[in-house]
Image: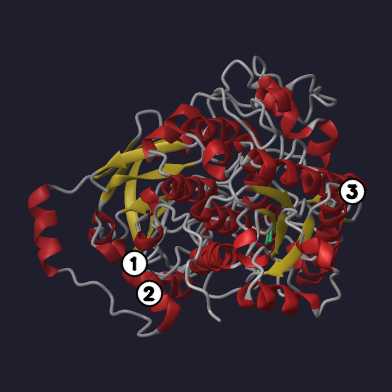
Amino acid sequence: MTKRRSSHWYGKLDKDGFIHRSWMKNQGWPDHVFDGRPIIGICNTWSELNPCNHGLRDLAEAVKRGVWEMGAFPVEFPVSSLGETQMKPTAMLFRNLLAMDVEEAIRAHGIDGVVLLGGCDKTTPGQLLGAASVDIPAIVVSSGPMLNGKYRGQDIGSGTDVWKFSEEVRAGKMTLKEFMAAESGMSRSAGVCMTMGTASTMSSLVEALGMCLPTNGALPAVDARRKALAHMTGRRIVEMVEEDLKPSDVLTKAAFENAILANAAVGGSTNAVVHLLALAGRVGVDLTLDDFEIGSEIPLLVNCMPSGQYLMEDFCYAGGIPAVLNELSDHLRKSQTVMGADISAYAEGAEVFSRDVIYAFDEPLKPAAGLRVLKGNLAPDGAIVKPSAATDALLEHEGPAFVFENIEDLKANIDRDDLPVTPETILVLKGCGPKGYPGMAEVGNMPIPAKLIKEGVRDMIRVSDARMSGTAYGTVILHVAPEAQAGGTLALVKTGDRIRVSASNGVLELLVDDAELAMRRAAWQPDPPRYSRGYAKMYVDHVTQANTGADLDFLVGKDTRIPDRESH
Ligand code: FES
């Protein structure tokens, strides 16, 4: 048998082994925890500045119970945490920093396997990216969603209802007092956003990828069964170490395809695209934006906000991800999970307990609702749109552009009474991509101009190099690549230009002739850099475009070496 990874730290009977063990013993550990048993890291993104993950301390204790029960030694360690609603300019700027933190923390320490505790939007992908690049046995336990939000006896959903309430206030249909009252009822328990936003999308897709135990995707944060799941995960990671079952054994092309199919069926977040592309890059899987087209024919099965009406708590009680995988069983690819068995084992025998919440594949909530990839001279490397959250009539449209040069321009002018826009106008926002914002902020779902809101308009086409929150909705074309700041055609669009969108044909065209575009390109200059030092400068210098996952170019791939230099 090959020596455990941890033996290079704790198994030596020399000065170095003495130092590694002795300092650990100041926490009160007896000799026998260093007897060669597996050492399991619990990588925790708990933070009081990340409210979505504040239940993770309790879950870490439950994981430890399972690890001890299997005769292994659990050690919990912190990494940086990314609270989506708390960070400026955008948590996405720091996803790759978290990934580096996780990767280097795992690589530097003498652990044999790792349990990843995350939840809020960027924490799940950040942890997966880091762990995949070290490629020791790894498994995920997610925070789980909050209980349904409540306001005046009605269910309200994180994010999705905030956008709605905010538009109602701007339209004069909701008072500020009512708006403020809704805020306390929206977030009334531990957990992540309880709509099918990015956090719940990612925990659901972690299940479809096979990187967690079944039911992890939807169990509410405060449901006692989530603690039991964490306990069982603690048991399973010890077995995975014995089996040497690593992320690269699970994260195959087939697993990514299953995640794409599941994302379509649950009406998942557009953010899943950049996270899955980046993760595939870490494990050497050849996944491209075009691969997401396999989801476009998959119907919407889950009736959850923002694409539907219910919330994650309802989705859990209706059967959760195992029930969705069962509905998709004719389409799922064969793919090994962290259980060692095929993904079909997660779906086996799963029942649907409410057809209002989880629809049958043959009688879906909406047909062919998966993300569509759009290409054309306005997005040579691609853009995406989420039909399940869009207005059908707008998915085939030609109209004049109204351009905002950057987010400040948009904020200053969107509510002008004399803004020259109609419901047919296509709003264009530049400068919000990975390099431009920087960090590719969630501002792509631009507010509808106040003058149109007052006329009752609730959706129009919006095009940008930004992302949008997984809780947002509308006919929003996102992730245009190359972005404006990188010199993409988006940078050349002028107000009044005509744009053609055809989701059915996968087209996003700027109807301006090549000679005119060449003249505009010759006169174009990128904006001066916003950062001259530190991580943000490194990010801007090295971030890749959205169509390859907005990872840092030097982080693509993995490196499984054990550090061979002793520090003492
Ligand atoms: Fe953290 Fe939505 S803001 S999960």
Residues at marks 3 and 1, CA–CA distance in whole angstroms: 41 Å
Q: Residue at x 56, y 30 (%)?
A: 258
471 w.r.t. 245: above or below: below
Residue 568 coordinates in the image, percent (x, y):
56, 81
Q: Secondary structure at mark 3?
A: loop
Q: Is residue 235 found left or right of 523 in the rendered image?
A: right
Q: Are marks 2 and 1 in contact (CB under 8 Å)?
A: yes
Q: Residue at x 62, y 47 (%)?
A: 137
Q: Secondary structure at mark 2?
A: helix
Q: Which mark is residue 223?
A: 3
Q: Would you name the residue on which mark 2 appears?
A: 538
Looking at the picture, tell me which residue is in the foreground, 375 or 261: 261
Q: Is residue 98 found left or right of 318 in the rendered image?
A: left
406 w.r.t. 515: above or below: below
| Residue 448 visible in the picture | yes
Q: Residue at x 63, y 43 (%)?
A: 206
Looking at the picture, tell me which residue is in the foreground, 484 or 115: 115
Q: Is residue 317 found left or right of 478 in the rendered image?
A: right
Q: Would you name the residue on which mark 1 appears?
A: 542
For disc 3, does the CB lie below 8 Å from ligand 1? no
Looking at the picture, tell me which residue is in the foreground, 222 or 348: 348
Residue 300, quarter of picture: top right
The three-letter amino acid code for the residue at tag 2 is Met
